Image: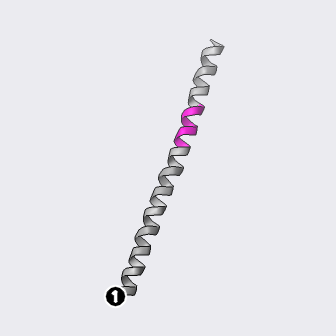
Amino acid sequence: MFQCFFLVNQIRELIKLFLSISMVRYQGCILFLIFHLEHKGHAYFLVK
């Protein structure tokens, strides 16, 4: 019984870790996209 609970706890921790890592990666992609779009926008305004 205790071993089963320990296993479930470990799996939950792994899922949390995976979610936090993927969220960081996802946020990084969004930040990169926003930065890229803003950079293009500035270049566009400079050309205009």
Q: How many marks?
A: 1
Query: Is 14 positioned to the left or the right of 26 in the image?
Result: right
Query: Is 27 positioned to the left or the right of 7 in the image?
Result: left
In which quarter of the view is residue 11 placed?
Answer: top right
Q: Amino acid at mark 1?
A: Lys
Who's the residue at 44% across and 66% down the image? Answer: 34
Who's the residue at 39% across and 74% down the image? Answer: 40
- Residue 12 higher or lower than 1, as above or below: below
Q: Nearer the viewer, residue 32 or 15?
A: 32
Who's the residue at 57% across and 32% down the image? Answer: 14
Position of residue 43 measured from the top left corner of the image (x, y, whole percent): 40, 80
In which quarter of the view is residue 13 placed?
Answer: top right
Is 19 in the magenta?
A: yes
User: What's the magenta region?
Assistant: 13-20
Who's the residue at 48% across and 62% down the image? Answer: 31
Mark 1 neighbour density, 10 Å: few (under 14) some (14–19) many (20 or more) = few
Q: Residue furthest left?
A: 48
Is 34 in the magenta?
A: no
Which residue carries the number 1 mark? 48
Task: Please tell me whether mark 1 sits on a helix, a strand or a loop.
Answer: loop
- Residue 38 higher or lower than 7, as above or below: below
